[in-house]
Image (cartoon, grey):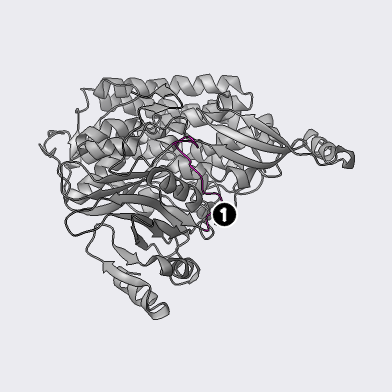
Amino acid sequence: MDTRELILQGSRLPQRGGDLMTLNMGPQHPSTHGVLRLELTTDGEEVAAIRPHIGYLHRCFEKHCEVLTPPQIIPYTDRMDYLAAMNNNLGFAVACERMLGLQVPEKVEHLRVVVAELNRIASHLVAIGTCGLDLGALTPYFFCFRDREMILDFFEEICGARLLYNYIWVGGLSHDFPEGMDDKILRFCDYFEARIDNELNPLLSFNKIFIKRNADIGVVPAEQAWAFGLSGPSLRGSGVDFDLRRDDPYSIYDRFQWKVCLGQGLMGTVGDCWDRYWVKVLEMKESLFIIRQALAARPKDGDVREAVPSRVKLPVGEIYCRTETPRGELGYYIVSSGGNTPDRVKVRAPAFSNLCVIDTASRGMLLGDVVAILGSLDIVLGEIDR
Amino acid sequence: MEFDDLIRHIRAALPEAVAEEHPEAFSPWIRVERGQLPELARLLRDDPSLDFAQLMCLSGVHVPAAGDAPETLWSVIHLFSPRHHHKLGLKVVLDAADPVCPSVAELWPTADWHERESYDLLGIRYLGHPDLRRILCPDDWEGHPLRKDYQAPATYNGMPLD
């Protein structure tokens, strides 16, 4: 009998009397990935229910949008999901361009895909690193951050910022790639692909303890995943073959060869924590494929600000536009009455919907498993609270 | 299914449900009377040829009075069917004096938090919601910040806010 079964058996002893206890996890807790408070109701070592309390990081993003023009809103989108700011910029720019009917130059489209996929890798590296860190694996975390650092260095060279870029503008980009950037990125792709296979996988993915802590934990079946609005790696971890880059295409993703990675229950049940983790590892490799293709196909000449309108005035109407960020479906619902500023911008943040499944996924699990489930859902409180 | 086919299909099952249709919009939507919403929502989710399994987004919007148009609040739902790859927007237009809308949290659990957010920031009350309380603002916050006429308070629990 393994430890987990012993603990479970112990906690089910009849003399315990079935008293429920309420515990607060957070708001200041290293494993809540930000300022999140989970009100845990525990039955011995088992979780009976979780009530998440969010809002500690609420910065009134949607209220700010009422008085800002679209180009002014883009820097604010950076600050929602600050681990994948490029993808947030991109989502908003695509929504505005669809409303304006704006055609974006080929070169811009290709560079956008490159930075968006690089940012996806950087974001997944944080997710993977902290996922291990929360479960006691300290070393892979440093390796992940070492590689993420290289991507941040690229971004710094491209646009001057390491975290909050304001890089993708409506109709274009703020800067062109500097000389020699393509080669640097390609060298990184080769370097990093080997790191995944030779370092990350043996050290963390197939680590016996890591598998024990993640396999069969926090299982979310496919149907439940849809019902709770899960998206991105959390949805695909449940074995759902769905990716907005392929199934609701935007930008030029339909031109590239890559595959959607799914959880298959390799270590346990489909939709467990390990599957959600594994999907992210596989996706990083797919992102490398996309980056190589985009760099190979990209036009060298052209001004990246060529199609940037001098004034962005959204036409009357409303749009719900969604894109695939590292965490899943980022939707912008924009209502405009033709003025300089939109009437309403509502953000459907992927982590917001991903987090609300935690109560259902955690019931009956051990207290320590909550940390694993939270880590595998890969939340960023900045976009949950907005 | 294309938008027109969707509307035809819905009208065949629930003749009263579609109050207005807007196929020309960037994201095509229909207006639904709030009394019709629960029945329509159930149809949209459960009819195999509609099969809207995903609620992408639920948003609230405040529209102040302009000219003859009265002040209203919208509760907007965006649905997607992963099986058929079609989308539909549902809009319930509510009188600002009586912002009560039926909840769809029972059908799509993800709506739970979105409705709480809409209640918190716009003051739309969702009937039948399992746990309607504020989500982003503190529980003792006053007012609904995303209303256009919202005045930020000068103090919160005795603390100056500016």
Rendered-image quadrant of the C terminus of chain A = top left
Residue A69: which quarter of the image? top left
Specify the quadrant that holds the N terminus of chain A.
top right
- Magenta span: predominant SS is loop
**Res B21 seen here:** yes
Q: Is residue B105 left or right of residue B60?
A: right
Asked if residue A348 can be seen in this view, the reply is no
Name the spot of residue A28 as percent of width and height, x first: 55, 23
Report whether B81 appears left or right of A166. right
Q: Chain of mark 1?
A: A
Residue A307 vertical position relative to residue B80 in the rendered view, above or below: above
What segment carries the magenta color?
B128-141
Residue named by callout 1? A224
Q: Is residue A129 above or below residue B144?
A: above
Q: Secondary structure at mark 1?
A: helix
Q: Amino acid at mark 1?
A: Gln
Which percent across, then down, holds residue A321?
Answer: 31, 50
Task: Give residue A57's position: percent from left, percent from top.
Answer: 44, 30
